[in-house]
Image (cartoon, rainbow, N blue to C red):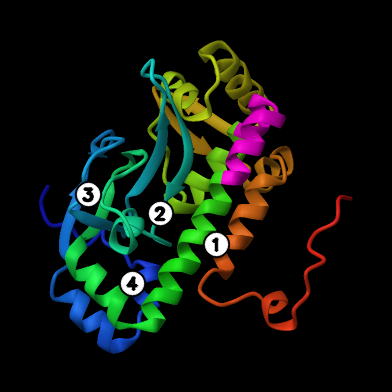
Amino acid sequence: MNAPSDKMAGSNRLLGALEIASRRRIDAYLEPLTLELGKVVCEAGGLLNHAYFPRGAVLSLLTVLENGSAIETANIGSEGAFGLFAAMYSRVSFNRCLVQFAGAADRCPIEWLRAEFKRSEHVRDLFVSYSETLLSQVQQTVACNALHSTEERMCRWLLMMHDRAEGEALPYTHEFLSHMLGANRKSVTLAALSLQNAGLISYRRGKIQVLDRAGLEKASCECYAMVRERFDAFLTPPSTAVKGDTKGRRPK
């Protein structure tokens, strides 16, 4: 893994939210990488020596079952990081972490992040806020996989990837999508064909291009919008937390 090109390099929102003193200390130990599609960053149960901060790459967290099957429960782009739990509490990964979209990332040794976590209240608040937000994505994905159709779930997944790939074509086969969505290949093929016939996407030779973003959002379940709203707000505490409002959402 070599240093990323300028085209592939971007910024990471989590690193960008650090206070200046913390960022300077962490910057000294950041190592730039280019992550290749399909690379396993860490296996489930593996020991983590680094945390990864994507700057163009997208990482997929997969829950792996005893029989070897796996399903995606969350994905991580330039808004966040993989390995923060290791920096805070444990060095063992519960998930398999796979590169879902090739691109740039930085990695930092766990021990230096852990030292900064102990040193700075701001870093503690930021890491805990992000981790809570990532957990909300996991919970929403579980509900989505259980209750929504394959077509709705595919729309949600494609929208999340379209955000992170910044409009680039997505290099995925139907077989890969079936693994990510926890659906059989036939249902994924039928869902992709339906979206293509509706003019929402084009699919050719393992490349998916979003043609009608607004239409894809309309065809998606509510899960995409809810997760995106949560990630857009994780760098600042919600107003409800300040006001003490515990009523929460009500079903429509």
- Residue 176 position in % (x across, y down): 41, 24
What is the residue that sits farthest to the top in this orientation? 186
Q: Separation of disc 2 and disc 4 at Cα?
A: 12 Å
Which label sits on residue 48? 3
Q: Is residue 148 visible?
A: no
Q: Earlier in the sequence, mark 3 or mark 2?
A: 3
Q: Nearer the viewer, mark 3 or mark 2?
A: 3
- In the rendered image of this protein, does residue 50 appear above or below residue 217? below
Per the image, label 4 sits on a secondary structure element best described as: helix
Per the image, label 2 sits on a secondary structure element best described as: loop
Q: Nearer the viewer, mark 4 or mark 3?
A: 3
Which residue is found at the position 78% from the left and 74% from the top? 245
Which label sits on residue 231? 1
Q: Which residues are magenta?
A: 139-153
Q: Separation of disc 3 and disc 1 at Cα?
A: 24 Å
Q: Earlier in the sequence, mark 4 or mark 3?
A: 4
Which label sits on residue 15? 4
- Residue 114 position in % (x across, y down): 25, 68
